[in-house]
Image (spheres, grey):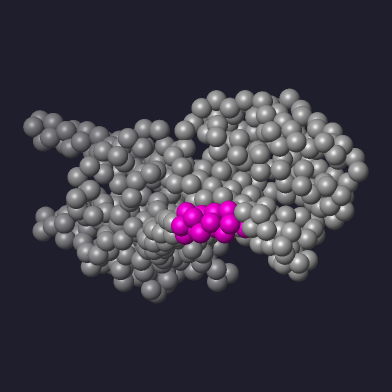
Amino acid sequence: MKSLTKDAEIEKLKQELEHIKQKLHDKEMVFNNILESTLAGYWDWYIQKDYEYMSPTFKSMFGYKDHELPNSPDTWQKLIHPDDLPGVLEVFQKHIDTKGHFPYDNEVRYFHKDGSIVWVYCRGRVIEWDAKGNPLRMVGCHIDITERKQAEEKFKGILESAPDAMVIVGDQGNIMLVNSQLKRLFGYTHKELLGKKVEILIPGRFQQNHPAFRKSYLQQPHPRPMGAGLDLRAVRKDGSEFPVEVSLSPFRTNSGTMVLAAIRDITRRKEAELQLKKSNQQLHIINQDLEAFSYSVSHDLRAPLRAISGYSIILKEDYEDSLDKEGQKILNTILRNTKKMGKLIDDILSFSRLARHQVEMQAVNMHETFREAYQELTQHITDRSIEFKLGELENIHGDKNMIFQMVTNLLSNAIKYTQPVKETIIEVEGNLINEEYVYSVKDNGVGFDMQFKDKLFGVFQRLHKDKEFEGSGVGLAIVQKVLDHHHGRIWVESTLNKGTTFYFTIPTHK
């Protein structure tokens, strides 16, 4: 009776075991179907038996039908690229040695049936061990990542072709990718940089605060220069620092937001800026000395010139009748040239004072300024017909006295060079264009050849002889100096024997 009961229990256990096996088989079939439907190649390796099941999708990934490849570990080891096999076996051994704690993850190359390369992401895990800790069974899957790798290679090619050092940083601050320019600039190898925090490229004194800046940037990522207005510094592997310019460009991936940083070494630019600053300082000192010298010389010349002029006038008034024609001619020449010399000294002094003048900004009515300057210049002209057309002009913010002097010089220029014209026309207009007041002073005078326009605004530069038109060659230089003080511009358009138009600008901001 007991024997029958025991047999019945054994039979019941057998049935339950078969039922469990069938459930496991069903689940395995479902799992295989899922893997097949996701286009992932599934493999099941019975390590001690030297048997490895490889799913049809696994084999088709490399262009083979199921029956064309035997289910054996030798199969995939023959298909894998020989340069990648040692690395795969090394990862496998680490996985075994750590009892599965070291992940079995690989990105490797396989040969397709047609000879092309197929990139595969392979992941697996030992799921059965014997009592001694030896692996018995390992399962895993292969995913074709060829398109992703090709895109990565294309992206790497773009990075390599960039003239700047480029680095891609993940959302945790780890370096994901660099180009050759960056390795060369910072002195690191590719292996020394990948996976490291980007702070490795930043001087130590800034490293503590930089993660907070990264986190803040990733909250609202957008393309922009890094540290706008700041002097950014980077540090090489050897510890040497250098100035940089950095541009940030974020982009989203399945792994999160990444940032592409373009880094440019601006050492030469900084050196050039420093040299330019020194040169400007030296030039400023030279100009100050020159202006002081001009002022001193001009001032010192006044006394002897005044004496020559005064005695010449006395000589003319008291003794002209005692002189012959040649003596009278010489005396008149002396008077004429002392007058010219006096005007030249006055202009040089005006120019020198202007250079040292402290600009006093205030509202300036340009319409009234032109009107007053014209009336002052023409109040004693009675033998000419001049039509003065003054348009409605915008008011500006500037130094009233300097602006009046500039306007006077421009109108004086127009009056002087229209002397040969019977009916003189001088037109003044103004408009607001792109945050600048643009004014024009136009005449119908003698004009000039535009190939000489660059000479106009230099000191003592003249396009006409004294016989034709008197002048010192300082008037337009003063105009240029006034506009320099007001951050304005001046240019000219002219046609020989038809007239000239001077244009000048004053910024709208105060």
Towards the viewer: 22 or 100: 100
On screen, residue 87 above or below 202:
below
Pinpoint residue 55: horizontal percent, then vertical percent. Answer: 45, 54
Instruction: Give left or right: position of 250 versus 380.
Output: left
Query: On the rendered image, what quadrant is the N terminus found in?
Result: top left
Residue furthest left in the image: 2
Residue at 38% x, 73% y is 83
Q: Within the magenta stretch, is there residue 9?
A: no
Does the magenta stretch mainly form a helix, a strand or a loop?
helix
Towards the viewer: 414 or 204: 414
Residue at 32% x, 35% y is 216
On screen, residue 42 above or below 428:
below
Instruction: Give left or right: position of 333 versus 137.
Output: right
Residue at 69% x, 49% y is 491
Which residue range is magenta in the image? 297-312
On screen, residue 328 above or below 138:
below
Q: Could one spot residue 195 in this view of the protein? A: no
Q: Could one spot residue 210 in this view of the protein? A: yes
Pinpoint residue 320: horizontal percent, then vertical percent. Answer: 71, 58
Pinpoint residue 353: horizontal percent, then vertical percent. Answer: 48, 47
Q: Within the magenta stretch, is there residue 298?
A: yes
Residue at 16% x, 33% y is 9
Towards the viewer: 413 or 28: 413
Instruction: Give left or right: position of 280 versus 204.
Output: right
Q: Quadrant of residue 486?
A: top right
Pinpoint residue 196: horizontal percent, then vertical percent. Answer: 26, 55
Towards the viewer: 249 or 231: 231
